[in-house]
Image (tube, rainbow, N blue to C red):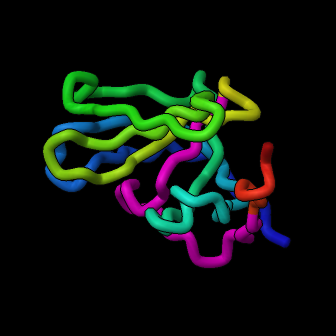
Amino acid sequence: MSERTTRKYLGSCHCGAVRFRIETDAPELTTCDCSICRRKNALMVRVHESHFELLAGSDSLTEYRFHTNTARHYFCKVCGIYPFHRKRVTPDYLGINVFCLEAFDPRGIPVRQTVGAAMA
């Protein structure tokens, strides 16, 4: 098994109104089976809030909460793309949609299926 190095990545929504930077070694990626994640079909990398920086677009973000109203899912108001969410169980972490990252190659990174649908 090869060791992954920590890298910085720039990310954005489709129109570029929301831009951010993360730092991660991407030890694993996750998918989730909850009702919203199934529909948005995102592949996520978990990042501590200290390794996330919103560079632009706070006024272009809209937030959606459901069920327990704890997890905070963010979408661009302009293009509708979902770049990240603040996690429910570990709110000091964000789930970053890897398809919004520049030059990020998910090949070879293990993907773990999380069970969100069963969370009460």
Residue 51 at x, y percent in the picture: 57, 29
Evaluate whether residue 57 shows in this view. yes
Residue range in magenta is: 93-113
Q: Does the magenta portion include 103?
A: yes
Q: Which residue is nearer to you in this view: 77 or 69?
A: 69
Q: Which quarter of the rendering shows the C terminus?
A: top right
Residue 45 higher or lower than 59, as above or below: below
Front position in the image: 38 or 67: 67
Q: Residue at x 79, y 48 (%)?
A: 119
In the picture, the quarter occupied by the N terminus is bottom right
Q: Is residue 8 above or below residue 48?
A: below
Magenta stretch encompasses residue 24: no
| Residue in the picture at 67% in, 34% down | 88
Q: Quadrant of residue 48?
A: top right
Q: Position of residue 100 (x, y in %)?
A: 37, 55
Which residue is pictured at 61% across the width and 40% down the height?
67
In screen coordinates, is 110 left or right of 105?
right
Rendering quarter of residue 50: top right
In the shown orientation, is residue 67 left or right of residue 4?
left
Going by the image, does 63 lie left or right of 42? Answer: left
Point out residue 111 in the picture as x, y percentages from the top left corner: 71, 70
| 55 or 87, nearer to the observer | 87
